[in-house]
Image (cartoon, grey):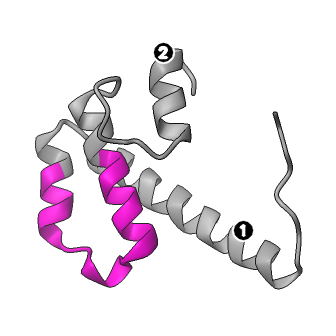
Amino acid sequence: MQGEESDAVESVRRGECDGQHLANADRELLVFVEQLTLRPSETHREDIDRLRSCGWSDPQIAEAVYVTALFAFFNRVADAFGLQEPNFH
């Protein structure tokens, strides 16, 4: 959300990562993160290479992987203890 246009933030919030409001590099990163979240065993070197070709550096890609893994961890802990998602609206 930091530094992005409100239309881009709203698109991501709705899960519409293929929208016109996102730069190609951002869209590719979100596609990668979704794959890593839903189908981690399908993640291959070619996926990392695609991110590199979009301009993402190895440290940035690593950070995306770490953040994705941390959120998966937090969500599983919250689910295990029956914690409810807060309503920020």
| Side (left or right) of 7 relative to 32 | right
Residue 32: where, in percent of width, then height?
Answer: 31, 57
Quadrant of the image containing the C terminus: top right
Question: Where 45 sits versus 17, above or below?
Answer: below
How far separated are the C-alphas under marks 1 and 2? 28 Å
Crowd rating for badge 2 (residues with CA inside 10 Å; few <14, some 14–19, many 20+): few
Which residue is at 66% across, 73% downward? 73
Which secondary structure, mark 1?
A: helix
Which residue is at 56% across, 39% downward? 13
Q: Is residue 20 magenta?
A: no
Residue 7: where, in percent of width, then height?
Answer: 47, 20
Magenta stretch: give its range: 29-50
Single out the mark in the foreground, 1 or 2. 2
**Disc number for residue 5:** 2
Q: Is residue 31 magenta?
A: yes
Which residue is at 29% across, 40% downward? 18
Observer-nearest of 63 and 47? 47
Earlier in the chain: of badge 1 and badge 2, it is: 2
Residue 34: where, in percent of width, then height?
Answer: 40, 61
Q: Quadrant of residue 46?
A: bottom left
Which secondary structure, mark 2?
A: loop
> Residue tagged by mark 1?
74
| Side (left or right) of 28 relative to 60 | left
Question: Where 60 sits versus 19, above or below?
Answer: below
The answer to the question of whether label 1 and label 2 lie on touching residues, with beta carbons closer than 8 A, is no
Q: What amino acid does circle 1 point to?
A: Phe
Q: Main secondary structure of the magenta part?
A: helix
Crowd rating for badge 1 (residues with CA inside 10 Å; few <14, some 14–19, many 20+): few
Quadrant of the image containing the N terminus: top right
Q: Quadrant of residue 2?
A: top right
| Side (left or right) of 20 relative to 73 | left
